């Protein structure tokens, strides 16, 4: 708790000072000062490359950490630690959006003086083109929401096949863009943080090749890009803090090296030799070797940035099929779970915490504490046995549990083995069925191949209860042909109506409260067995400053870090 | 010689063709949907999935896909990508599903790492293995022979991921003489390159050196007991000359043969070492591609590995024939 | 597979031991006498025997300890420190003779002895497939016509040239889990490992074919199958046996390698290779977790190699054993 407060205050200072650039030359080494933070080279050591550096092909999460250095979007996440960092901030736009017509129309105005890295001005048409581009089948991977939300966009095949574009995105002038939606969507400002909302100049579009040299609108531009290896960024001279209140852009250069292994990354940042003193990582958690060492090494412990990316791991089953159509069986499975063993299998209490609610413990998500079918820390097999007997299974049940074969993941074999062991004590025989990690999610999400029980994970596309609860519990989201996330096959008209009602709310605080209440209602029905929520812990190099972690991303923010 | 060579090359080509059929059949027919992975689980509607499948060519029968693969290999092929069309020149192994890059480029990118690993290790294992073997044969029954014997048995019984782990524990954790290896390219920093590879080299070389020491010892002993060596000795030639000129050359033939085969097997033998030390080589690329169902890359790597081994075997036979005049290739 | 499987295969492939004539067949008693006179081989035999015993008696041993290989003990690890075992030496105690596994707290002794089962089972099973296939195809090549011999020769080339490790990794990752894992490992290793045996058998057959007793049986009107199994097969037993003995340790290494790459047996079934692959991230926090399976795997492979070497020398008087001190 104390830590979080510290983070918040640091973040607040950073936020207030970020606009005032080029103040007096205070050179107090040690403390971070945004006015004098410029200079040096930040090194990023990663396991995986971005894979696709095309704004159309990147997924949401507020534009991601590295993309946010290059691509500005209509709105963005507030660059601050903790809960403050879960708020939407205007980016290219002057505000987070003006709703009208019951939140079915959203209007944005662009700031003055916005330029691409070639000096040409950024227009509303460029933003519209970027969005329409992301509908092209040649450029898969972006967030899918707009296809469903925009009027008449469901069958749009992208700018190459249908250059006329989407009528529901209007650009009355060069600085204004209007979105017309089919239904009220109070969360539209959150969606507008997705990378597909970043401008792409039509003249520079080279299709699938665009990702090799995308045009930048952010504080850096690409000097050199070798896929899966190096991405070297230098300052974009056409960007300045005066047109961007969110990004600090302290280092002169940012070098991103990928294709490294997790142990190597952690060892190098911990060791901090040479350029590694300025190193960070955006995709690597602390390994067991580092965690085991933290107690005896306060210097290292100080360099651990901890955070909470909203993510929930749970057991999913089809509640319309026996034996899980019986609420008593589902409750028994909840009582019997040993969350302590599961948390340990997932990396221990530094990387995970037990979950009794579906929503992670965050205010912005609308978290409300509940635990209707308590299992204690290590499970209540007696209660489970009793419920199973009441449900007509006095001799226990036998089920098949699917898991990914990818070791070390939340849905991996270690967690599966922990569950198997816990359920044995309650008279439940669990057979494990490993599915290779490449086809695991697809298998689970297709009702034709959905296993009896599976370890499933769900992360928020933005920090609000809507994208967390809707795909998983809204009855109208059951998809028979695959890509189904309502694994419980839960369809309750009352719940569906309530979801529609909350979706209209444009005030995030008020919406959060309602999502929390909804989560509690769903929890009472025992539709899933929640296992644990993920925690994040990553190292920073010895020289790295201003590494606050927001509850939106769970990671420190590359646009705020300084190495000076 | 020439007819023999032609026959071997044609045979090798046939072996590779058979290999490609087997690999293609197995991987393209097994369950798992690469298109879904490319499209994203969360982001893909059914019709968009169909479009992606079409783009990857997965909507066509496997036989057609195989035919396209073969023609691409021989004459290159065109791949449409958004508004423009790319030409992938022969030999075209196709495009990675995941990164849209030509498979050949991906492989070329990783090859230097695997080559660095093997070349350095080879220098080590040849010097340790052949040296140990020669000494052991000459000092038969003495201490050095017994020591070599112990080394050979130990080396051959210790899997490379165990020797590597032990080296890491001793040199990086306990003694802290070396940083945790993290690959640096030879061109950018030669000293760093050597430092980053020294442990992997030793780990890999230990196993191989044992093999070579054993072979050297056996063939040296065999040649030393042969008539012309005895004759040479009887004629009063100096011992060093006997060994250098005659005995060692006799042992050279099987050694060169084994080396040619081993070099062909580079990709195979290095993959465990690469995985353990996190070296971004071909072995790591394979594991990654398997995990993401990046079939064109998997097929390309398996074929490349087969190609290297087949070529290695042909070279081994040639070396054998050239060095050992008793064999005539017809 | 990997560098080391190559040893068994390439050793015979590249360097011509194959065309040598059949060694004089020794009586079983003579072989035994020679083996027990060979000190390293005796060590190998004793330790390998011990490993087999441990594997067979795994349930008994764990019962004696009072533990089993699958029960989690979350109370025995430090959750805040990534799940490192509480207590010194990885949590060694009277209840847990070798300590517990990090993160899960499962008993390491139980997992180790059960792990021996998988290692040995897969190695033996794969050797059976390899030898079975090798003998059949070798006999067919040696006794069949020129065409069949050529075709099988190419096939053998293909198998020996096959990038088997790479292919196995790919295949094992993709075959559904419903197929029993140990069996799959045996089959895949068997499928790629019969080349050496086939070559040896073919060579033996070619030289045996012209022998008098074979010719006599043919003249007496014995069917080709009868000739193959009654007259030829006994002659190939000795070389095949000595070769099979080398296959065992090399198979153990292969299984460990595949498990190390994460495509071997599935949890919660323990195997040494799989334990080692998890241990790679723990060599700082819990060294014992690395050393136990590493040492055991090494010693077991070593003793099987020593035994194989002794057997080979005992069976073939011309071979000079590596382990035997020269007289």
Image: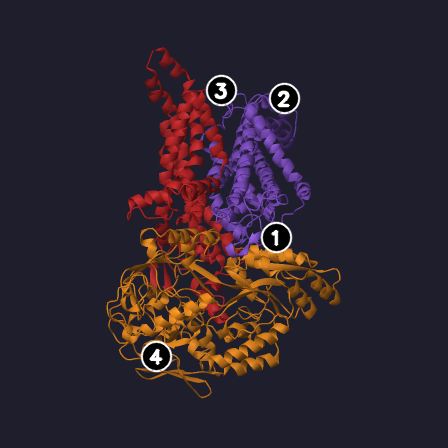
Give the chain coloured orange: A
Tag shown at residue C326: 3
Between tags 4 and 3, which lies in front?
4
Residue underneath mark 4: A93
Alpha carbon distance from label 3 to label 2? 24 Å
* Element on which disc 2 rests: loop
Please rate how many residues cluster around mark 4, counting C-alpha atoms within 10 Å: few if below 14, some from 14 to 19, many from 20.
many
- Label whose residue precedes the other's in the sequence (1 or 3): 1
Alpha carbon distance from label 1 to label 4? 54 Å
How was this image coloured?
by chain
Q: Do labels 4 and 2 share a chain?
A: no
- Label whose residue precedes the other's in the sequence (3 or 2): 2
* Element on which disc 3 rests: loop
Alpha carbon distance from label 4 to label 2? 92 Å
Chain identifier of the residue bearing label 2 in the image: C
Nearest the camera: C240 or A465? A465
Chain identifier of the residue bearing label 4 in the image: A
- Quarter-of-image position of residue B147: top left
Tag shown at residue B207: none
Q: Are the residues flagged by discs 3 and 2 in contact, CB closer than 8 Å?
A: no
Residue underneath mark 1: C73
- Quarter-of-image position of residue A245: bottom left
> In this structure image, what is the colour of chain B?
red
- Label whose residue precedes the other's in the sequence (2 or 1): 2
Q: Are marks 3 and 2 on the same chain?
A: yes
Between tags 4 and 2, which lies in front?
4
Chain identifier of the residue bearing label 3 in the image: C
Nearest the camera: B212 or A361? A361
Residue underneath mark 2: C27
């Amino acid at each position: 708790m104390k830590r979080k407060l510290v983070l918040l205050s640091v973040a607040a200072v950073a936020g207030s000072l970020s606009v005032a650039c080029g103040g007096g030359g205070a050179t107090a080494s040690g403390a971070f000062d945004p006015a004098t933070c410029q200079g040096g080279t930040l090194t990023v050591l990663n396991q995986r490359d971005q894979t696709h550096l095309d704004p159309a092909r990147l997924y949401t999460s507020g534009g991601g950490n590295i993309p946010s250095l290059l691509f500005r979007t209509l709105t963005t996440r507030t660059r601050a630690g903790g809960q403050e960092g879960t708020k939407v901030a205007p980016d290219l736009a002057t505000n987070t959006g003006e709703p009208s017509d019951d939140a079915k129309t959203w209007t944005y105005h662009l700031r003055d003086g916005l330029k691409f890295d070639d000096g040409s001005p950024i227009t509303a048409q460029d933003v519209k083109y970027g969005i329409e581009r992301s509908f092209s089948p040649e450029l898969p991977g972006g967030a899918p929401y707009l296809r469903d939300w925009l009027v008449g966009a469901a069958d749009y095949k992208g700018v190459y096949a249908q250059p006329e574009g989407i009528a529901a995105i209007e650009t009355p002038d060069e600085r204004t863009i209007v979105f017309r939606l089919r239904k009220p969507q109070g969360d539209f400002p959150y969606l507008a943080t997705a990378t597909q909302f970043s401008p792409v100049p039509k003249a520079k579009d080279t299709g699938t090749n665009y990702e090799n040299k995308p045009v930048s609108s952010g504080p850096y531009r690409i000097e050199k890009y070798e896929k899966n290896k190096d991405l070297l960024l230098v300052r974009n001279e056409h960007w300045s803090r005066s047109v961007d209140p969110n990004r600090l852009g302290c280092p002169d250069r940012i070098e991103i090296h990928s294709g490294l292994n997790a142990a190597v990354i952690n060892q190098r940042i911990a060791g901090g030799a040479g350029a590694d003193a300025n190193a960070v990582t955006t995709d690597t958690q602390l390994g067991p070797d580092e965690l085991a060492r933290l107690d005896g090494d306060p210097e290292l412990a100080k360099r651990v940035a901890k955070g909470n990316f909203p993510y929930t791991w749970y057991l999913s089953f089809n509640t319309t099929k026996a034996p899980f159509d019986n609420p008593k069986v589902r409750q028994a499975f909840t009582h019997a779970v040993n969350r302590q063993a599961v948390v340990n299998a997932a990396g221990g209490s530094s990387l995970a915490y037990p979950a009794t609610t579906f929503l992670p413990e965050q205010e912005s998500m609308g978290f409300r504490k509940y635990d209707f079918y308590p299992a204690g820390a290590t499970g209540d097999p007696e209660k489970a046995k009793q419920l199973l007997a009441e449900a007509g299974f006095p001799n226990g049940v036998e089920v098949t549990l699917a898991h990914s074969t990818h070791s070390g993941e939340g849905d991996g074999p270690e967690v599966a083995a922990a569950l198997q062991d816990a359920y044995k004590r309650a008279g439940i025989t669990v057979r494990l069925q490993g599915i290779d990690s490449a086809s695991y999610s697809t298998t689970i999400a297709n009702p034709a191949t959905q296993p009896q029980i599976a370890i499933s994970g769900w992360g928020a596309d933005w920090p609000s209860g809507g994208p967390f609860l809707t795909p998983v519990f809204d009855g109208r989201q059951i998809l028979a042909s695959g890509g189904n996330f309502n694994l419980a096959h839960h369809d309750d008209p009352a719940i569906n109506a309530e979801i529609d009602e909350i979706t209209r709310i444009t005030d995030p605080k008020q919406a959060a409260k309602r999502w929390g209440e909804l989560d509690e209602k769903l929890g009472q029905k025992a539709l899933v067995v929640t296992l644990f929520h993920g925690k994040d812990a990553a190292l920073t190099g010895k020289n790295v400053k201003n590494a606050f972690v927001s509850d939106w991303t769970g990671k420190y923010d590359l646009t705020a870090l300084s190495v000076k | 010689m020439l007819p023999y060579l032609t026959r071997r090359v044609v045979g090798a080509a046939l072996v590779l063709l058979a290999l490609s059929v087997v690999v293609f059949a197995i991987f393209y027919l097994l369950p798992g949907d690469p298109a879904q992975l490319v499209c994203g689980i969360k982001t893909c509607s059914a019709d968009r999935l169909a479009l992606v499948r079409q783009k990857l060519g997965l909507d066509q029968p496997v036989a057609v896909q195989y035919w396209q693969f073969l023609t691409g290999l021989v004459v290159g092929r065109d791949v449409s990508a958004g508004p423009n069309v790319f030409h992938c020149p022969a030999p075209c192994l196709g495009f990675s599903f995941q990164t849209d890059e030509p498979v050949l480029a991906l492989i070329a990118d990783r090859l230097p790492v695997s080559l660095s690993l093997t070349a350095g290790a080879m220098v080590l294992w040849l010097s340790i293995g052949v040296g140990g073997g020669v000494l052991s044969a000459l000092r038969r029954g003495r201490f050095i022979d017994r020591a070599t014997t112990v080394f050979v048995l130990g080396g051959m019984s210790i899997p490379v991921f165990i020797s590597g782990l032990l080296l890491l524990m001793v040199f990086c954790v306990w003694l802290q003489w070396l940083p945790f290896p993290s690959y640096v390219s030879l061109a950018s920093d030669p000293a760093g390159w050597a430092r980053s590879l020294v442990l992997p080299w030793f780990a890999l070389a230990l196993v191989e050196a044992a093999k070579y020491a054993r072979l050297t010892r056996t063939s040296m002993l065999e040649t030393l007991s042969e008539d012309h060596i005895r004759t040479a000795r009887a004629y009063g030639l100096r011992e060093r000359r006997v060994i250098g000129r005659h005995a060692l050359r006799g042992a050279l033939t099987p050694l060169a043969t084994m080396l040619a085969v081993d070099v062909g097997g580079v990709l195979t033998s290095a993959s465990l070492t690469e995985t353990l030390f996190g070296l971004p080589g071909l072995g790591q690329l394979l594991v990654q591609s398997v995990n993401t169902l990046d079939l064109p890359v998997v097929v390309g790597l398996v074929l490349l590995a087969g190609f290297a081994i087949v070529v290695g075997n042909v070279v081994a036979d040639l070396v054998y024939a050239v060095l050992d005049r008793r064999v005539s290739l017809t | 597979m990997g560098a080391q499987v190559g040893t068994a295969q390439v050793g015979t492939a590249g360097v011509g031991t194959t065309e040598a004539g059949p060694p004089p067949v020794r009586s079983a008693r003579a072989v035994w006498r020679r083996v027990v006179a060979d000190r390293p081989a005796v060590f190998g035999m004793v330790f390998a025997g011990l490993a087999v015993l441990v594997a067979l008696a795994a349930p008994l041993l764990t019962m004696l300890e009072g533990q089993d290989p699958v029960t989690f003990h979350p109370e025995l690890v430090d959750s805040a420190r990534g799940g490192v075992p509480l207590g010194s030496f990885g949590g060694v105690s009277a209840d847990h003779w070798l300590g517990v596994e990090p993160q899960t707290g499962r008993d390491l002794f139980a997992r180790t002895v059960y792990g021996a089962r998988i290692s040995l089972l897969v190695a033996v099973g794969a050797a059976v497939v390899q030898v079975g296939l090798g003998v059949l195809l070798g006999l067919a090549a040696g006794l069949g016509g020129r065409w069949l011999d050529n075709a099988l020769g190419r096939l053998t080339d293909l198998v020996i040239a096959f990038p088997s490790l790479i292919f196995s990794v790919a295949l094992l990752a993709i075959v559904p889990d419903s197929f029993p894992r140990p069996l799959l490992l045996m089959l895949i290793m068997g499928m790629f490992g019969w080349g050496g045996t086939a070559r040896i058998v073919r060579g033996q057959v070619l030289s045996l074919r012209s022998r008098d007793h074979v010719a006599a049986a043919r003249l007496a009107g014995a069917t080709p199958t009868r000739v193959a199994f009654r007259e030829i097969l006994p002659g190939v037993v000795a070389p095949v046996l000595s070769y099979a003995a080398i296959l065992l340790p090399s198979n153990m290494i292969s299984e460990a390698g595949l498990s190390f790459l994460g495509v071997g047996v599935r949890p919660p079934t323990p195997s040494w290779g799989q334990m080692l692959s998890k241990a790679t991230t723990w060599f700082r926090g819990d060294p014992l977790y690395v050393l136990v399976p590493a040492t055991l795997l090494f010693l077991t492979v070593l003793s099987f190699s020593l035994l194989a070497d002794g057997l080979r020398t005992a069976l073939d008087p011309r071979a000079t054993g590596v382990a035997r001190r020269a007289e």
